Amino acid sequence: MSKEYLGEFEELVLTMVGILQEDSYGNAIVTEIKERVGRESNLSAVHVTLYRLEDKGLVKSYMGGASNLRGGRRKRIFQITNAGLAMLRSMKESRIDLWKLIPQLKIVGVN
């Protein structure tokens, strides 16, 4: 895997794919971002990001079964790949290393 950079939203979407596993599709990711992070996102932004992550080899997708609830349409389900998991681990380790470099901060005004 090359050392690619992920933007903050790409990382967030990739993390949600890892969390949701077999329930990882566009609307579920939008909902999960809202519930877990309190951030509004729109479906088209999530889809564009998922396809970009797929192009990078960090997720793969397949078509799920059709349902009456969706008018017979099928969902595209996304799965994190080994490369995607390795990317998240690498980013986590990098952040932890950076956090360790922050000196102990004293809260001003507290005795």
Image: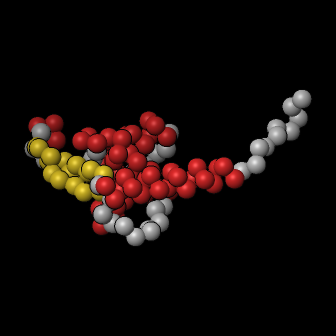
Q: Using the image as rendered, state which of residue 92 and residue 29 is in the foreground.
A: 92
Q: Residue at x 69, y 53 (%)?
A: 101
Q: According to the image, what is the colour scheme of the structure?
A: secondary structure
Can you give x and y, in whole percent of width and height, for residue 79 in the image? Answer: 27, 50
Q: In front: 37, or 22?
A: 22
Left or right of 2, for residue 72: left
Identified at 51% across, 51% down, the residue is 92
Pinpoint residue 95: horizontal percent, then vertical percent: 57, 53
Asked whether residue 51 is in view, the answer is no
Name the image quarter holding residue 54.
bottom left
Residue lying at 86% horizontally and 39% vertically, measured from the top left: 108
Where is 77 relative to 67, above or below?
A: below
* Quadrant (top left, top right, bottom left, bottom right) of the N terminus: bottom left
The residue located at (49%, 40%) in the rendering is 37
Q: Is 20 on the left-hand or right-hand side of 3? A: left
Query: Does residue 17 appear anywhere in the picture?
Result: yes
Q: Is residue 24 above or below residue 56?
A: above
Count of marks placed on residues: 0
Q: Residue 49's spot in the image, x, y percent?
A: 37, 59
User: Quadrant of residue 48 in the image?
Assistant: bottom left
From the top left corner, tell me how far across and down residue 60 is, in percent.
Answer: 25, 57
Q: Nearer the viewer, residue 36 or 18?
A: 18
Q: Quadrant of the C terminus?
A: top right
